Image: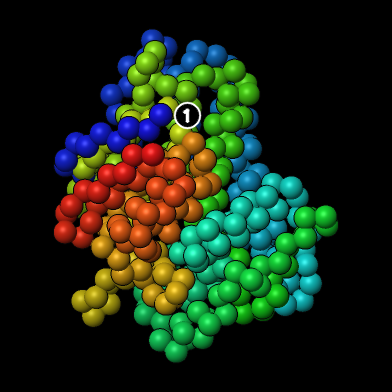
Amino acid sequence: MIRPALVITAMLLLILSVSCSDEPVTRYEFLMDTQCSITVYDAGDEAYIDQTFALMREMDRRLDRHSQDSQIARINRSAGICPVQVDGMTYSLVARAKELSILTSGAFNPLLGALSSLWAFGSPEHEVPDASQIADLVSHVDIGCLVLDEEDMSVYISDPAVQLDLGAIAKGYASQVAAEHLASCGVERAIVNLGGNVYCLGSKGPDEDWVVGIQNPEAPTGGYFATVLCSDAAVVTSGSYQRRFEVDGVEYHHILDPRTGWPADSDIVSVSIVSDDGALADALSTACFVLGTQEAGRLCRSMGVGMLALTTSGRIVRLDA
C-alpha cells in the first residue's frame, strides 16, 4: 500500500520513527558507487546480511560498465562487432531496461553510456562538452540498436558509437533482489538502502507502514521535505542536487535528457517513485525527472505507481498509486 504523507520541510532517503521490538542490526558496504546499508529488524542469524551483500557484490561485478571484467563492459567493447552471451540476470535486466525505454518514449534510455562519459560528472576536472560532440552522440542513441536474442541469451549493440549504461535502473533492481533474498531467508522486516534507492521489506509493525523521509535539496543530509509511507515497496528518488558542477556561473546536473544530450531542463528538482517493483521505480524516477510534472503524472497514472515531486517553484506534487 502506498500513501505519501506530506511533511513540508524537505531529500536523500532515510527511514524515520522506527520502533520495533527487536534490536535492529545494520551493516554498511560501499557498492555500486554508493554507500549501501542493510538493516534487519528481526532477531535472527546475521549471516543473512552477509549473504545479501555477497549477492549485491556479484550483481555489481556483472553490471558495472566501468569494470573491464563486467558483462556490460564486454557488451560495450563488442558494439558494432558481435553479440555477447550473458547470464540470465543480466539478460533480464537489459531486456527490462529496453522495455521501459519504449514505455517511457525514450525519457529513460539505457544507451547513454557514451554521453555520460563525455560529460564526466565523476571527474574532479569539470568541463562542459562541445555542443557538436553532444549532438553527434545523441544522433546515435536509438533503442532499436539494442538487439536481444532470448534463445541465445545474447545482447548486441549494433552501433559502435553507443554504450550501454544500466546506472539508472540497476540499484533499484538490486535493492529488490536483496530484499527478496532476505525474505527467502525468513526475514520479515528489513530496509535495504542503496544510496537513495530504498526497498522496505514487510511493514514496521502490525497495520503500520514504514516512514521514508525524502531529502530536502536545500538542507544538510537528514533534512527532509516530505515523507512517504510504504510496505513491501521501493522508494527511489532522482534529483538535480545529487551530482552537479558549475562552470561560468551555470550549474549542470547529471540527469541527462536522452533527446538533447544536455542536463534535463524540466520543472522538477526532485522526484520520488513508489512501487513494489524496484527496477521500475528506479527507471521511472529518471524518466519523470526528464519529462516534468505534467507528463510524469500521466506516465505514473498509466503505470499505477506513486509519485512525489518537488518543483523548481517549491510546489509539492503528489500522486497516489
Q: Secondary structure at mark 1?
A: loop
Q: Residue at x 55, y 50 (%)?
A: 170
The colour scheme used to paint the residues is rainbow
Total marks drawn?
1
Q: Which residue is mark 1?
A: 232
Q: Image check: 60 left or right of 155?
A: left
- Residue at the extreme top of the image, as rendered: 21
**Could you tell me the amino acid type at mark 1?**
Asp
Q: Image check: 251 left or right of 279?
A: left
Q: Residue at x 83, y 55 (%)?
A: 151
Q: Nearer the viewer, residue 59 or 152?
A: 152
Q: Nearer the viewer, residue 15 or 126?
A: 15
As displayed, is residue 45 above or below residue 232? above
State the image coordinates of residue 251 (x, y, percent, origin top left): 27, 71
Quarter occupied by the C terminus: top left
Note whether residue 215 is visible.
Answer: no
As displayed, is residue 306 above or below residue 96? above
Q: Image check: 252 left or right of 53?
A: left
Quarter occupied by the N terminus: top left
